[in-house]
Image: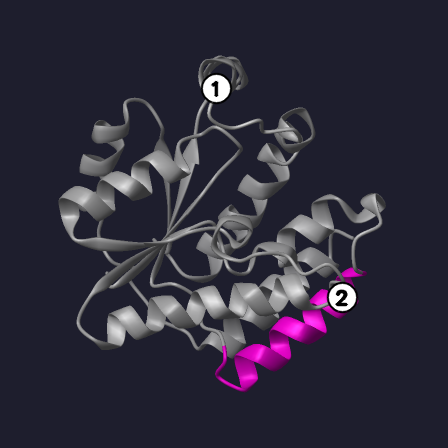
Amino acid sequence: MSIICLEGASAVGKTTVSKILESEYGFVRIAEVNELFERPRYESSTWYFERQVNRSQLAREISANGGKAVLDGDPFQPVWYNWIYAKEGLQPIIEVFDFYKSSVLSGDIEFPKKYILLNASISDLKTRKESDKTRSRRNFNKHLKLIEPQRAYFEGMNSIIENYVDFVESDKPHNVVVKISNLSNPTQEITNSQLIDAMCQFVANRT
């Protein structure tokens, strides 16, 4: 699997695990938008989406050169995030659909080869948040509310491509890395355009 993506709630361990994959397993970590890019003073409505495209392109360049990339966060995140927090004043979900469908059709962005959704109990997440003084996680409580709909989204993705998403219990980081290293490839393939159409329809049916 040349390009994998880690997802899950805040404090679930995405960054820690991706850094271990980088330091010990030869992956190159592609950080989240807010770590990788400096936000402009005047931000266009699509700036964040465009940076997600850039992250996908970085991963593809690494893969094309024979390397392995781990995306610390989903480059297609707005498709499910703007659905979950539709009442937060974010871009309308139809604009998200239009941007991502167009970007997929143009070949500017592709889905990773494998998703791993990390899971932990809310009590464990709160404990980790309190023990990690290096990050403020100011939206932590808000983001706890995404756990169930986010899982439903990725379960929906798995119903389209069997074994495309693995749900991994996030215990000790090195244990998680071992679990990831032993995961198998998806059992089937569909085109990126078919998948983005299916996931946009999944969200639209629940909006």
Q: Check the picture and name the quadrant holding the N terminus.
A: bottom left
Which quadrant would residue 174 be assigned to in this image?
top left
In the rendering, at what x and y percent does residue 180 appear? 24, 42
Comes first in the chain, label 1 or label 2: 2
According to the image, what is the colour scheme of the structure?
one colour
Alpha carbon of mark 1 to alpha carbon of mark 2: how far?
32 Å
Residue where numbered disc 2 is placed: 45
Q: Which residues are magenta?
A: 92-108
Q: Is residue 182 visible?
A: no
Q: Residue at x 54, y 40 (%)?
A: 151
Task: For residue 134, say whether it is visible.
Answer: yes
Q: Is residue 128 left or right of residue 141?
A: left
In this rendered view, identify the residue nearer to me: 111 or 127.
Answer: 127
Specify few, some or many for label 2: CA neighbours under 10 Å numbering under 14, 14-19, or 20 or more: few
**Mark 2 and mark 1 in contact (Cβ < 8 Å)?**
no
Q: Which residue is mark 1?
A: 133
The residue located at (40%, 38%) in the rendering is 14
Please, what is the three-letter code of the amino acid marked with disc 2? Ser
Q: Position of residue 153 (x, y in %)?
A: 57, 49
Vertical side of 199 occupied by 142: above or below: above
Q: Secondary structure at mark 1?
A: loop
Identify whether 96 is placed above or below 125. Answer: below
**What element does badge 2 sit on?**
loop
Residue 34 is one of the magenta-drawn residues: no
Q: Quadrant of residue 62?
A: bottom left
Could you tell me the amino acid type at mark 1? Lys
Residue 27: x and y, percent? 22, 54
Question: Looking at the image, which residue is at 73% across and 63% down?
Answer: 43
Q: Quadrant of residue 67?
A: bottom left
For this orientation, the residue located farthest to the bottom is 106
Instruction: Give the label on residue 176, or none.
Output: none
